[in-house]
């Protein structure tokens, strides 16, 4: 990738034995350069996406080439031997639909390393929030000045020199004030005719909040209908408490205004108030992002194409994800992330009477689960605490690694089995999603197994990472 000055890229550059910037080279020069280094395995992180390196890989500069993370599907290319995935996003029964052999990672194929790069999610103290707000406001002021916009009044004061008591409290009801202090464009709601109104918050603190941070083109009419049905107050129902009848609030990220009036119309059509559909007008600065997103109670995933990196961020903010796995890899990532938490509630009976409480079986179950979560806020808060505890354990455990792994290949079985022995340490208390040490060691063992196949002149075969349970 291009140099971006990010902490992640700086750490990668510092930790690697050799780090080369080949962005100024031609395709042929890059391929020759890579080939001269004689790599054992070449990993592609972009696939058929932005700034692809596919033409370099087509020249086969490495004997083993693997694609991971960037493109959620098969490359359909004979020069890519392996695709890193997990057994949820690409189950064995789907292997025939891929030109690559599966390189099954430990737990979810989306590695979460937020305990290193995003620890601010765990510090919501007044002083930490004051610093975060000041950093966000400063970034917004700089952006406005370079783009020719006038600074807003909130950005003229140096928040770092003010008392933390001047920073508005971070709450649902008064979120608008907090965002204004952080230099954000604020919140809005829309009527079905597309008229925009200022929203001061997400509603009363006791009202459940359903967020969705995916772009709206991922949402289909069935999902939108389930969302607006869930926020509609269930007045007139008997044998239910007042808390179960208040309905909920929908909270979206607004990438443009094209969908706002349509969602408002959908809400109105089922008797839900469009004022309960709140839009955040622009992205949150990274300094406040996790704290702000953590105000939601649950994220409703888009079944047609799930949250990927957005899903990792959502769970790290302490918010569970309700998802519905589809047929394609891109529509199964939410389930991969949620199941990698290994939380007890994933095995509870769902809203439709079967399956998981957070991973739906079909569209009807998805709608029933979401409605049940909104109407049982105490249960929803328990699920959220579980996700927060999983996140907290990751920071406490630091993604502790295990001590031993064995990679072996059995030609008779037609696949490589990577068996890893787990030490009863901090890692034993980590949810698999946050056990980055174990994930990396499995990854490394898999890479060795893939190259061993070349040495043994064996054709590529599916690689499986198997973890031995604790004795």
Image (spheres, rainbow, N blue to C red):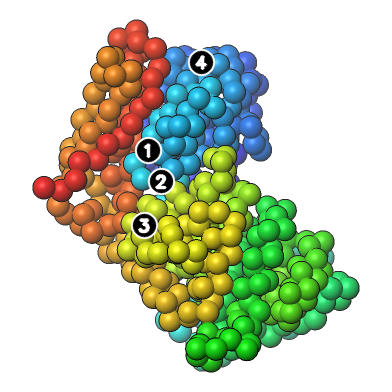
Q: Give residue 300's position: percent from left, percent from top.
A: 57, 63
Q: Nearer the viewer, mark 4 or mark 3?
A: 3
Q: Residues within 10 Å of mark 1 (few under 14, many from 20)?
A: many
Q: Examine the image and state in which quarter residue 26 appears.
A: top right
Q: Nearer the viewer, residue 74 or 64?
A: 74
Q: Residues within 10 Å of mark 2 (few under 14, many from 20)?
A: many
Do the CB atoms of the residues marked 2 and 1 lie less than 8 Å apart? yes
State whether residue 173 appears in this view: no
Q: Nearer the viewer, mark 2 or mark 4?
A: 2
Q: The N terminus appears in which quarter of the rendering?
A: top right
Q: Residues within 10 Å of mark 4 (few under 14, many from 20)?
A: many
Mark pair 2, 1: CA separation:
7 Å
Do the CB atoms of the residues marked 1 and 4 lie less than 8 Å apart? no
Residue 105's disc number: 1
Task: Determine whether 454 is above or below 263 in the image.
Answer: above
Disc with the residue nearer the chain's start (4 vs 3): 4
Q: Nearer the viewer, mark 1 or mark 4?
A: 1
Q: Which residue is mark 3?
A: 341
Q: Which residue is mark 2?
A: 108
Q: Which residue is mark 4?
A: 61
For image coordinates 47% across by 17% down, the residue present is 62
Q: Is residue 396 left or right of residue 363?
A: left
């Amino acid at each position: 990738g291009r140099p971006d000055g990010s902490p992640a890229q700086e750490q990668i550059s510092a930790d690697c034995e050799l780090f080369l910037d080949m962005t100024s080279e031609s395709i042929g020069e890059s391929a020759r350069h890579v080939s001269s280094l004689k790599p054992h395995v070449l990993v592609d992180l972009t696939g058929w996406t932005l700034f692809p390196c596919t033409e370099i890989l087509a020249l086969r500069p490495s004997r083993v080439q693997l694609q991971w993370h960037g493109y959620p599907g098969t490359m359909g290319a004979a020069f890519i031997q392996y695709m890193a995935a997990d057994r949820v996003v690409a189950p064995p029964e789907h292997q025939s639909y891929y030109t690559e052999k599966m390189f099954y990672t430990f737990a979810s194929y989306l590695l979460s390393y937020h305990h290193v790069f995003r620890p601010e999610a765990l510090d919501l103290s007044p002083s930490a929030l004051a610093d975060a707000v000041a950093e966000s406001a400063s970034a917004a002021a700089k952006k406005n000045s370079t783009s020719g916009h006038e600074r807003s009044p909130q950005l003229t004061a140096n928040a770092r020199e003010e008392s933390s008591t001047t920073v508005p409290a971070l709450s649902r009801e008064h979120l608008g004030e907090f965002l204004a202090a952080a230099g954000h464009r604020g919140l809005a709601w829309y009527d079905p005719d597309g008229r925009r109104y200022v929203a001061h918050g997400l509603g009363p603190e006791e009202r459940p909040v359903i967020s969705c941070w995916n772009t709206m083109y991922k949402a289909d009419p069935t999902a939108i209908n389930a969302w607006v049905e869930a926020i509609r107050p269930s007045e007139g129902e008997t044998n239910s408490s007042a808390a179960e009848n208040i309905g909920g609030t929908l909270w979206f990220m607004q990438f443009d205004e094209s969908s706002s009036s349509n969602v408002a119309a959908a809400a109105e059509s089922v008797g839900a108030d469009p004022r309960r559909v709140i839009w955040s007008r622009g992205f949150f600065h990274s300094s406040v992002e996790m704290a702000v997103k953590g105000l939601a109670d649950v994220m409703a995933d888009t079944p047609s194409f799930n949250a990927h990196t957005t899903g990792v961020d959502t769970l790290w903010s302490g918010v569970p994800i309700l998802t519905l796995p589809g047929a394609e890899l891109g529509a199964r990532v939410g389930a991969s992330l949620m199941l990698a938490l290994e939380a007890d509630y994933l095995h509870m009976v769902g809203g439709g009477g079967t399956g998981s409480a957070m991973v739906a079986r079909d569209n009807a179950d998805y709608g029933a689960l979401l409605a049940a979560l909104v109407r049982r806020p105490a249960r929803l808060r328990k699920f959220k605490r579980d996700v927060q505890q999983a996140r907290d354990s990751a920071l406490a455990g630091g993604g502790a690694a295990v001590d031993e792994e064995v990679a072996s290949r059995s030609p008779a079985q037609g696949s490589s089995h990577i068996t890893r022995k787990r030490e009863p340490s901090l890692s034993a208390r980590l949810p698999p999603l946050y056990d980055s040490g174990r994930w990396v060691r499995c990854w490394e063992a898999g890479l060795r197994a893939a190259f061993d196949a070349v040495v043994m002149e064996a054709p590529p075969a599916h690689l499986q990472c198997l973890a031995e349970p604790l004795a």
